[in-house]
Amino acid sequence: MARDTLDTLIRLADAEIDTARLTLQKILAEEDAVQAKLNELAAQLEHETSLAAKDPELGRQYGVFIDHVKRKRHKLNAQLDAIRPKVEAARDALAEAFANQKKYEIAKQNRNDTAAAEGKRIEGLILDELGLNAFRRSK
């Protein structure tokens, strides 16, 4: 019965690990998407800067574009700042789930080792008894 309980706890810990992994993957995907937007914004800024340097007419509108880029960059950085604690929390939850699973696996292994040692002890006692009886009969 206890063995069944540990097996059940290990399966539940596996499910908890899977859930924690999925959660972490989703949050990391969010972080990657925001980072990709920041990279895209930087590339766009570089492109517009080179265009504005070549064409004086575009240079007049460049200030408005820079203000837009600053606002957007600030917004994206705020999103990243909000996501990072979620990433850490998800990583902590995953580590805790792994730790719980490891505890159950160690307990199961200890129980198996104890049962095997008890089986060997009993087998040794039986063999000792058989040997003793054979010795008595031979006299």
Image: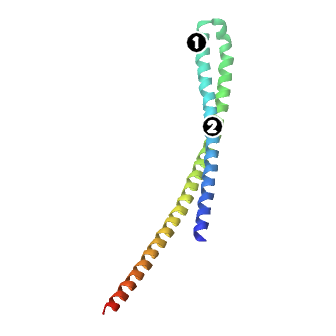
In-front residue for pair 49/117: 117
Task: Report the amino acid beneath label 1.
Answer: Ser
Please determine whether, in this image, residue 124 is positioned above or below residue 109. below
Residue that carries the numbered disc 2 in the rendered image: 29
Q: Could you tell whether 102 is left or right of 117 in the image?
A: right
Q: CA distance from mark 1 to mark 2?
A: 32 Å
**Rendering quarter of residue 34:** top right
State the colouring used for the structure image.
rainbow
Q: Secondary structure at mark 2?
A: helix
Q: Quadrant of the C terminus?
A: bottom left
**Residue found 59% across the figure and 70% down from its top:** 2
Q: Is residue 44 above or below residue 108?
A: above
**Foreground mark, 1 or 2?**
2
- Of residues 117 and 125, the one nearer the viewer is 125
- Which residue is labeled 1 in the image? 50
Which x, y percent locates residue 47?
60, 15
Residue 15 location (% of width, % of height) = 63, 54
Residue found at the far left of this picture: 139
Residue 120 place in picture, x, y as percent = 42, 75
x, y (%) of residue 133?
37, 88
Binning the other alpha carbons within 10 Å of mark 1 as few (below 14), some (14 to 19) or many (20 upward) gives few
**Mark found first going from the N terminus, 1 or 2:** 2
Q: Mark 2 is on which residue type? A: Ala
Identify which residue is drawn at 66% across, 9% down.
58
Numbered disc total: 2
From the viewer's perspective, tell me whether residue 98 is left or right of residue 138: right
Residue 66 — which label? none
The correct choice, above or below, for 96 with respect to 73 in the image is below
